Image (cartoon, rainbow, N blue to C red):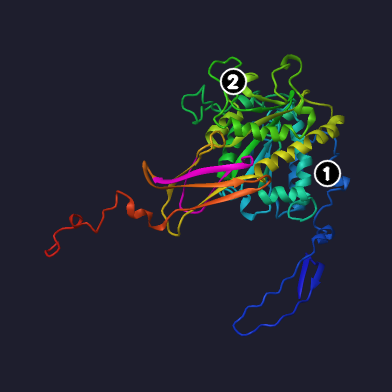
Amino acid sequence: RVEWKGGAQVFGQKAVSGEVSPDQRTLLRVEVPVAREAAEPDKPDLSRKESLPERWTWWSNNQLGEFVHKMQESNPEHCKAFNIGKSFRGNDIWTLTVSTRPDAFPSANTPPSSLAPSFLYVGGVHGNEPLGRQLMFYMAEELCAAAGRQGVDPEIDRILAGGTVHLLFSMNPDGFEMKQRGNGKGVDLNRNFPDPIKWSKFPQLTGNEEPETLALMNYIDLLGDSLIGATHLHGGAEVMVIPFDGNKSGKRAPNPTPDDKLIRYLGRRYVDAQPEMATNNGRGVDAGLFQNGMVQGSNWYPLWGGLQDFFYLKNQVYFTTIEMSDEKWPDASELPKWWKQHRPSMYELLKAYLCQGLTVQVDFPDGAKEEQVVVTMLNKGMGSQVRFKTSSTHGVHYPVPAGEYSVRVEWKGGAQVFGQKAVSGEVSPDQRTLLRVEVPVAREAAEPDKPDLSRKESLPERWTWW
């Protein structure tokens, strides 16, 4: 007999029987019905008004903290709250991770597995631009209501089968409370990161980083190679902004990344899901600057010390900026309109990063020594080179459009390349292709720092006292 229960409450049971034959193992399978969870008393009904604050209004920092814990309580196996640090004024900075993989959740000293890709939404970098922060609450409700509950929402099933979603609701909770752009000290956090143009020691810290900046740096470092994409949500225009934000001249001029082709494809996935943005070529002072809802940052106005340039260069994260509304702080009565407009795009971006692309899995043999691995995308403009050290299985993900791709994998010690292998594969629409590279067990025999014991001169004269 198999019973499934919560506390003292038995939700259901089933008795099964079978015969065991000599030298055989018999399998009896019991399927727990999908619909049982609706009756579980320890999970709040997220449709009940008293479970959450009033829906179409701006939720406070206290309500944010209560909300992430309610989401965790509602689905503790698949939704986990994580405090990444405190703001200048001591407010908590909360994230929520949603995944169906047990190894995808970060903890204080343990990164998620690199074998499943993940994506991060960052809200509230500027405290007086709260739309992204609030819309992320609505997305979190839907993700946590469906995660691990097959059939509740097929679109979310597909997204979470592909990877993990991280939601950082408010990087700048002080600024939100004070209704100002900067943090509690008045610092613009999107100008507070080490910049490769302005800081000769990049990516080292400058010593001027705010606590919110350091918290996000540490969090993205913790997520490691599982994190392939991120975007931060702003207000003041309706446009997708792609890197680089900065340039050397300081004047409006193009400065695209080496992966401009890939990043434009990813940005276009968001933009094309909503006609309001896709038809925007700029309004007012921005008239004519946007190309169907998209602009490369330095071609709009150059800035230095921003999130997307820093994390693109330091962490190889395909990072963008989304300006969600012309008005920085819209009236709360307009929240239903903005959610309806941006919801399809927010999910489409998750599908672009998590549901389609190329995964390169590098397998090391048992007992192998740690070595440096270099993974290079051979299709120009379709992905950055990734370097890491490992002695075990490790994954690298490229969120590329459909097509044929080739990748080179090298394993090396210092400047000495021990071996390399090129692999190719086709990515189909809405599919993730896996390419596996096995590092050979015997490769060390060819390493030049190990003597060849078969050569006579490698040893002293044989028949004498050594």
Does residue 22 appear to the left or right of 61 in the view shown? left
Disc 1 residue type (three-letter): Leu
The quadrant where residue 252 appears: top right
Give the x, y percent position of residue 382.
57, 36
Name the element at disc 1: loop
Farthest left residue in view: 464
- 433 vs 224, nearest the viewer: 433
Per the rendering, the mark at residue 52 is 1
Q: Is residue 371 above or below residue 125?
A: below
Question: Badge 2 is on which residue?
Answer: 254
Q: Which residues are magenta?
A: 386-412
Q: Which mark is residue 342?
A: none
Residue sitting at the far bottom: 22
Q: Amino acid at mark 2?
A: Pro
Please name the residue shown 60% across and 49% down the image. 433
Looking at the rendered image, the quarter that the C terminus falls into is bottom left
The answer to if 344 sits in the magenta stretch is no
In this view of the protein, can residue 146 be seen by the observer? yes
Which of the two labelled residues, at mark 1 and mark 2, occupies the earlier sequence position?
1
Residue 128 lies in quadrant: top right
Image point (84%, 47%), residue name = 51
Circle 1/circle 2 CB separation < 8 Å:
no
